[in-house]
Amino acid sequence: MLYKILNKKKFYFSFIFFLLTGCFSERTEGIYPYNAKKDRDFILKKTAEDHFWLIADEATGYRQQETLDTGIHPFVHVPVHFYLYYKDKKPVAFISYYCDSSIFANIQFVYVDKDYRRQGIAEKLITFVLDRLRNQGIRSVEICTRLINTGARSLYEKIGFNYLYDTGKYVYLTYSLHNA
């Protein structure tokens, strides 16, 4: 009986310790789901700084703050998922995506802080999201960038995205998870 009580107390202590250290510890290098308390200001600041590259000109009325607060895309009214990449104990990149249906998804934002670019972080984030979507049964993923953003397009094509079409201002690429 005493053994059971001690084991139960040990379990509860370990569980509480895990919760406390997981909630309050600094994040090490890697990919983490969005946490409003830790990540909101970073995403809003970077979206404002790089608005031209992140928000389409035609998306007047899009408010990143609204999306972060509600977790819902304001135009298509579906859940939006954000993940951040931490390095040097701080967020340095983020990605977001949403699913249009049970088989189609859109990667909405891929952002890496200028001091951390060309280190493979964007590729890690995109690969992470593609794996998640594949596991959900998604068959096709679309991504869009400005036509003049040749660096992003090059990366997307290196990962396996294929040209779908362009509007003269934006280029749309698609990735098939069905055959991947």
Image: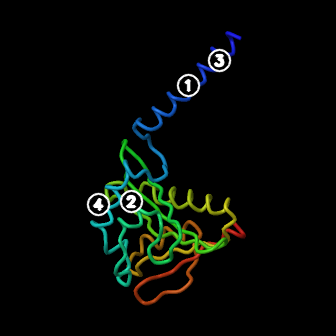
Q: Earlier in the sequence, mark 1 or mark 3?
A: 3
Q: Residue placed at 37% from the left, 42% from the top?
A: 89
Q: CA distance from mark 1 to mark 3?
A: 10 Å
Instruction: Answer whether labels 3 and 2 touch (C-beta < 8 Å).
Output: no
Secondary structure beneath label 2? strand
Q: Residue placed at 46% from the left, 63% from the top?
A: 71
Q: Is residue 29 above or below residue 20?
A: below
Q: Is residue 143 above or below residue 89?
A: below
Q: Residue placed at 71% from the left, 70% from the top?
A: 178
State which mark lies toward you, 3 or 2. Answer: 3
Q: The residue under label 4 is which amino acid type?
A: Lys
Q: Residues within 10 Å of mark 2 (few under 14, many from 20)?
A: many
Q: Earlier in the sequence, mark 3 or mark 2?
A: 3
Q: Earlier in the sequence, mark 2 or mark 4?
A: 4
Residue 81 image point, x, y percent: 51, 61
Q: Say which mark, if any, is on residue 7.
A: 3
State which mark lies toward you, 1 or 2. Answer: 1
What residue would you read off at disc 2? 112
Q: CA distance from mark 1 to mark 2?
A: 36 Å
Q: The residue under label 1 is which amino acid type?
A: Ser
Q: The residue under label 3 is which amino acid type?
A: Asn
